[in-house]
Image: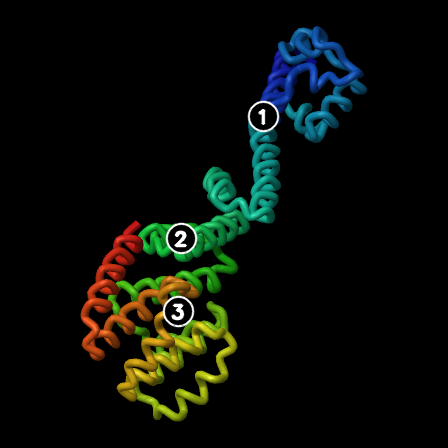
Amino acid sequence: MNDLFYQNLGRKIREQRKNKKMTQQALCGTQLNRSMLSQIENGIARPSVDTLLFLCRQLEVPLSYLMCESKKEEAQYTRIQTIEEIRLLYGNGQYAKCAGLCRLIIEGDDEVSLILAQCELHLAEAYLKQSALNSAAKHIASAEIAVQDAQYGTEDIHARCAFLRMLTNAVENQLLPDVETVLRFGKAADATFVFYCVLLSCTEFAPEAVSFVLARCLQKEEYRNFVLARIKIHQEDFSGASLLLRPLCLHPPGFFTEFFALRDLEYCFQKLENYKEAYELAKKRLMLSEKYAK
């Protein structure tokens, strides 16, 4: 083997050591001295097979990586190593860091494309919990872009993106989605939330008794109370509706319910001629709109 081979070998050892933030002393352990390692990393010394195997164990890299001579083989190893790190980051819930790594090797890899899209959706949902709808929308769009060229497993991603976009659009347009629209997303969202959205739509036209019975089927109290409050508004029981809505405005289950509960409570106070409370709620709704723009 020529000098160029040992220079490349030393370079790879040095790069892997620095990537793992290891000092020369840490890499040497008790089996190698720093002077020898320095010579190996600079391509001066020619390490034995035993020394190479020791360094591979320390660096957690296969011997084949250190021995490969072409840039193509080296790039392939680096790609495999990066994919393993991507899987680890995703499994640990480090979605932002995982997404950054995915973007380095997304081209031509369906698995990485799908992981990137899932990361973007997790990040979008995190922003939705903070009511930062504009930031969430950017991540939703990024999720769809990530899988635009993927061949498999994209249907669920697109459906989930469409569902989240429907919710944000409903809030931005201040209009609850209709039944037909909501039912299209049965597999793309939590079944309880879909049922909740359907009930909200039904209160606009279904018989009140039917809506009341369906509302009692909801296991989540916050959702159930909002549907019941909607029914009371249709019955013009604005005092009863406001009692159900006030706790929802203080402790909302999510941005979707928070906005509509706040709007409905403001409407109830207007009907009760409690204009001071209605004015305070209008200010709070304005502040909420500013949060959504983040």
Tell me which corner region of the image, top left, top right, bottom left or bottom right, holds residue 128: bottom left
Q: Residues within 10 Å of mark 1 (few under 14, many from 20)?
A: few
Quarter of the image where the N terminus is located:
top right
Image: 99 above or below 59: below
Q: Which residue is disc 2 drawn over? A: 127
The residue that appears at 41% across and 91% down in the rendered structure is 210
Q: Position of residue 184 (x, y in %)?
A: 41, 75
Given this view, does label 2 or label 3 mark the residue nearer the observer? Answer: 3
Q: CA distance from mark 2 to mark 1?
A: 32 Å
Q: In the rendered view, tell whether residue 121 sits above or below residue 250.
A: above
At horizontal 23% and vertical 63% (from top left) the residue drawn is: 280
Few, some or many C-alpha atoms within 10 Å of disc 3 (few <14, some 14-19, many ≥20)?
few
Q: Is residue 271 left or right of residue 75?
A: left
Sequence-wise, which precedes: disc 2 or disc 1?
1
Instruction: Give the percent coordinates (x, y) of residue 175.
Output: 27, 72
Question: Which amino acid, mark 2?
Answer: Tyr
Q: Residue at x 66, y 15 (%)?
A: 24
Query: Quick one: 101 or 242, which is closer to the camera?
Result: 242
For the point 26% across and 56% down, the residue is 287
The residue identified by callout 1 is 19
Give the residue type at disc 1: Asn
Determine the image quadrant of residue 179: bottom left
Q: Position of residue 126 (x, y in %)?
A: 44, 53
203 left or right of 65 in image: left
Residue 105 visible here:
no
The disc placed on residue 247 is 3
Q: Earlier in the sequence, mark 3 or mark 1?
A: 1
The mark lying in front, picked from 3 and 1, is 3
